Image (spheres, coloured by chain):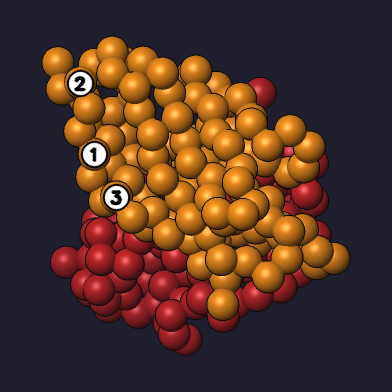
Amino acid sequence: DAGVIQSPRHEVTEMGQEVTLRCKPISGHDYLFWYRQTMMRGLELLIYFNNNVPIDDSGMPEDRFSAKMPNASFSTLKIQPSEPRDSAVYFCASCSSNQPQHFGDGTRLSIL
Amino acid sequence: AQSVTQPDIHITVSEGASLELRCNYSYGATPYLFWYVQSPGQGLQLLLKYFSGDTLVQGIKGFEAEFKRSQSSFNLRKPSVHWSDAAEYFCAVGAVYSSASKIIFGSGTRLSIRP
């Protein structure tokens, strides 16, 4: 069975550029989560969706970050403009209600 | 406030030795508890979960965990570790309510295996 698929796996770009991270959740899962992982702050929940609707975006660091889920099989996390402090590993996870979350392999983002 | 504490940042054990990773939580409602493992360059993989019932739960890769409500703990154990168990381990707590499957993660414990 296909798990949560994230792309790209690695992204290196210069500060000020727009970055778009993509996620395909497991088919049938109605929750989707975006996390950021850094050495300093650990694993942080940025935003999550239920049935394609954003439920809680209180973890989004600032207005430069935005996330969308246009349909049940696709979500994006966008950073515009990007800054060096945005460098981190970004994870997407999905689950069905009352079930554990399944994680993708992450996108390692480096902003120069 | 809801929180998860993993007091050990880094643990080193010898291959073949037993392992216990500690996890304490603070949660207002009856918690749902999880242990995840993260290998380098990988995402988090679910080891085991506790939702209800038997407080000793078995997981994959020979791991088990015991829920102790009186101690607000959910420690992870393995009787004999293998070199492949070297990874980062995360405890997490959540509560299923009407609108979310949101969980809170601990800061993680890095496990190293001594040959």
Q: In the image, which disc is placed on residue B8?
A: 3
Asked if marks 3 and 1 fall on the same chain, the answer is: yes
Q: Which residue is mark 2?
A: B14
Give the residue displayed 68% in from the left and 56% down from the top.
Answer: B31
- Counting labels gives 3
Residue A54 in view here? no
Q: Is residue A104 left or right of residue B32?
A: left
Task: In this rendered view, identify the residue nearer to me: A9 or B80.
Answer: B80
Q: Which residue is mark 1?
A: B11
Asked if residue A3 is positioned above or below residue B104 in the image, the reply reads: above
Q: Quadrant of residue B7?
A: bottom left
Name, please, the residue furthest toward the right.
B98
Give the residue displayed 41% in from the left and 45% down from the top.
Answer: B22
Q: Chain of mark 1?
A: B
Label 3 neighbourhood size at 10 Å, few (<14), some (14-19), many (20+)?
Answer: some
Query: Pointers 3 and 1 in contact (CB under 8 A)?
Result: yes
Residue B2 in view here? yes
The hue used for chain A is red
Relative image position of residue B76 (x, y in whole percent): 47, 36
- Label 3 element class: loop
Q: Is residue A55 left or right of residue B97?
A: left
Asked if marks 2 and 1 fall on the same chain, the answer is: yes
User: Chain letter for orange?
Assistant: B
Asked if residue B115 is positioned above or below residue A74 in the image, the reply reads: above
Relative image position of residue A80 (x, y in whole percent): 40, 77
Relative image position of residue A76 (x, y in whole percent): 56, 61
